[in-house]
Image: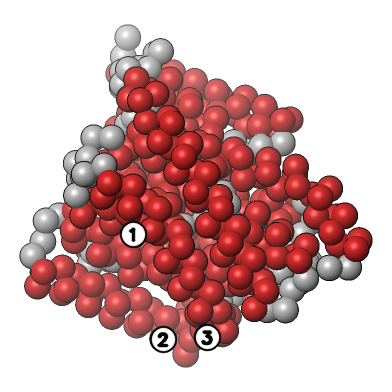
C-alpha cells in the first residue's frame, strides 16, 4: 500500500479512537488525558498494534500541541495580573515549589538515578495541570468561589517558575558545564524579562498588529506569531512552550477571548495527539514494575498539594471549606508534567523515568477530578456549618 495511504489510515484511526475515548471520558466524568495516554501505550513500541508509518507525523503534531496548550494558557492572563499575582502570592508559591518538587527529587535520589533525573522528577511532581484544574473548577461551579483566585495565582506562579526551570533542565540534560548552564539560564531570564516588559509597556501595539475583524486572519496571525516566538525561544534554549505562553500573556481583553475561542478546537486536537505521542514513547511492559512506586508518589503528591492549597487559602482569609477546595483543585497533573518527562526521556536521563511519569500522571489526571467530585458533598456540609 502507498506510504501516504498508510499514513492517512493510521492517523485517521488514531484520531477516531481518541474521539471515542473522549466521549467515554465525558460520560464517566473524568479527564480524557489518562485514556489518551493508554491509547498511546496501545499503539507504541510493545503495544497491541504498533504504528508503522505515522509516528513521525504524530511527533510533529505533539510539538504543536504543547505550543498551543501553553499559548491558550497564557491568554488566560495579562502581564499586569501576573505581576500583581506574583507580588501577593509569592510566599505561597514558594511553599508550593518546596512541598511539591521535593517528593520527585527525593524519589529519584533514593533510587540512585542521579542529580539530572532528580531535577526532572522534581518538575514532574511539582506542576499542577492548569487545563484539568480549570475544567474541574468549571464543571463543579467553583469558578466564582473566593478561593479560585488563590488557585489561579498559584498556577501562574508555577508557569513562571517553569520559564526558569525548563532552561535549567535543558542545560543539565544537554550535559552543559556550570558556566554553559549559567549562560543558558541568564539568556532565558533575559528573554522572559524582555517579553514581559514588552507585554506590560507595548502590549497595545502587539494587539493592534494581531487584531482583525476576520476570524481566519486573526487565527493565522496569533498562531503564526506564537510559532515564530516559540522557534526563537527554542533557539535561545528557553523552551518553545514558554515562548508561546509569553505570547499569550502579551494579548489581553476581548482580543484574547476571541483568540481563545478560535484556538480551542485546534488546541484540543493537537493536545490529544501530544498525550498519545508520550504514550507511544513508553513501553507498557515497563509501567507495571513501577506502578507501586507511582501510586506511592501520587499519594504523597496529593497530600502535599492539599497542604499547599490549605496554606495559600488560609493566608487569604478563606474559610475551611474553601481551603479544602483549593487543595483538591491543585491535585491533577497533566500537560507540563508529561512535557518535562518527555524532555528527560528524549535526552536519556534514565530508562525508568518515562514509565514512572506516565503511571504517575495517569493516576493523578484521573483521580484529581474524581476526588473533587467525591469530596463535594463533604465540603458542602462543612460550608453549611459556616466554618
* Res. 144 image quadrant: bottom right
Image: 12 above or below 353:
above
Mark closest to the chain's N terminus, 3 or 1: 3
Location of mark 3 (residue): 87
Please state if 103 lies on the left or on the right of 183 as rendered: right
- Local crowd size for mark 2, using a 10 Å CA cut-off: few (<14), some (14–19), many (≥20): some
Quadrant in which the N terminus is drawn: top left
- Badge 3: residue crowd in 10 Å (few <14, some 14–19, many ≥20): few
On the rendered structure, is 231 left or right of 90? left
Q: Quadrant of the C terminus?
A: bottom right
Is residue 97 or residue 345 the one in the foreground? 97
Question: What element does badge 3 sit on?
Answer: helix
Q: Position of residue 190 (x, y in %)?
A: 28, 80
Q: Is residue 162 left or right of residue 110?
A: right
**Along the line of sight, which residue is nearer the eye, 22 or 262?**
22
Task: Pinpoint residue 246: horizontal percent, then vertical percent.
Answer: 43, 70
Residue 348, x across and y down, in percent? 19, 41
Q: Label 1: which residue?
A: 240
| Cα–Cα gap, marks 2 and 1 | 19 Å
Pick whichever of labels 2 and 3 is earlier in the sequence.
3
* Marks 2/3: CA–CA distance: 16 Å
Instruction: Name which residue lies at 55% across and 79% down.
Output: 89
> Visible in this render: residue 43?
no
- Label annotation for residue 79: none
First in sequence: mark 2 vs mark 1: 2
Q: Residue at x 22, y 40 (%)?
A: 350
Amino acid at each position: 500500500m502507498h506510504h501516504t495511504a498508510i499514513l492517512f489510515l493510521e492517523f485517521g484511526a488514531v484520531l477516531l479512537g481518541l474521539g471515542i475515548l473522549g466521549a467515554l471520558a465525558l460520560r464517566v466524568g473524568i479527564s480524557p488525558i489518562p485514556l489518551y495516554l493508554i491509547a498511546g501505550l496501545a499503539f507504541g513500541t510493545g503495544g497491541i498494534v504498533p504504528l508503522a508509518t505515522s509516528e513521525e507525523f504524530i511527533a510533529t503534531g505533539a510539538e504543536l500541541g504543547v505550543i498551543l496548550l501553553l499559548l491558550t494558557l497564557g491568554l488566560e492572563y495579562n502581564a499586569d495580573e501576573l505581576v500583581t499575582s506574583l507580588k501577593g502570592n509569592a510566599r505561597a508559591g514558594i511553599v508550593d515549589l518546596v512541598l511539591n518538587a521535593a517528593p520527585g527529587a527525593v524519589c529519584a535520589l533514593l533510587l540512585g538515578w542521579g542529580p539530572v533525573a532528580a531535577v526532572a522528577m522534581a518538575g514532574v511532581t511539582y506542576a499542577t495541570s492548569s487545563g484539568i484544574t480549570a475544567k474541574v473548577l468549571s464543571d463543579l461551579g467553583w469558578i466564582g468561589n473566593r478561593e479560585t483566585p488563590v488557585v489561579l495565582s498559584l498556577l501562574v506562579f508555577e508557569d513562571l517558575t517553569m520559564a526558569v526551570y525548563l532552561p535549567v533542565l535543558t542545560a543539565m540534560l544537554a550535559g552543559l558545564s556550570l558556566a554553559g548552564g549559567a549562560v543558558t539560564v541568564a539568556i532565558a531570564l533575559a528573554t522572559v524579562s524582555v517579553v514581559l516588559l514588552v507585554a506590560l509597556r507595548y502590549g497595545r501595539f502587539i494587539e493592534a498588529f494581531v487584531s482583525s475583524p476576520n476570524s481566519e486572519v486573526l487565527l493565522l496571525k496569533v498562531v503564526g506569531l506564537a510559532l515564530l516566538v516559540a522557534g526563537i525561544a527554542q533557539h535561545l534554549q528557553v523552551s518553545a512552550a514558554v515562548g508561546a505562553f509569553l505570547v499569550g500573556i502579551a494579548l489581553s481583553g476581548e482580543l484574547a477571548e476571541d483568540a481563545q475561542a478560535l484556538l480551542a478546537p485546534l488546541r484540543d486536537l493537537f493536545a490529544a495527539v501530544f498525550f498519545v505521542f508520550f504514550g507511544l514513547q513508553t513501553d507498557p511492559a515497563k509501567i507495571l514494575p513501577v506502578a507501586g512506586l507511582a501510586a506511592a508518589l501520587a499519594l504523597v503528591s496529593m497530600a502535599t498539594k492539599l497542604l499547599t492549597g490549605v496554606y495559600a487559602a488560609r493566608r487569604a482569609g478563606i474559610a475551611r471549606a474553601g481551603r479544602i477546595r483549593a487543595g483538591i483543585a491543585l491535585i491533577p497533573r497533566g500537560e507540563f508534567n508529561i512535557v518535562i518527562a518527555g524532555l528527560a526521556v528524549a535526552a536519556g536521563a534514565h530508562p525508568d523515568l518515562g514509565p514512572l511519569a506516565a503511571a504517575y500522571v495517569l493516576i493523578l489526571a484521573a483521580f484529581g477530578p474524581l476526588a473533587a467530585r467525591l469530596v463535594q458533598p463533604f465540603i458542602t456540609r462543612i460550608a453549611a456549618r459556616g466554618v
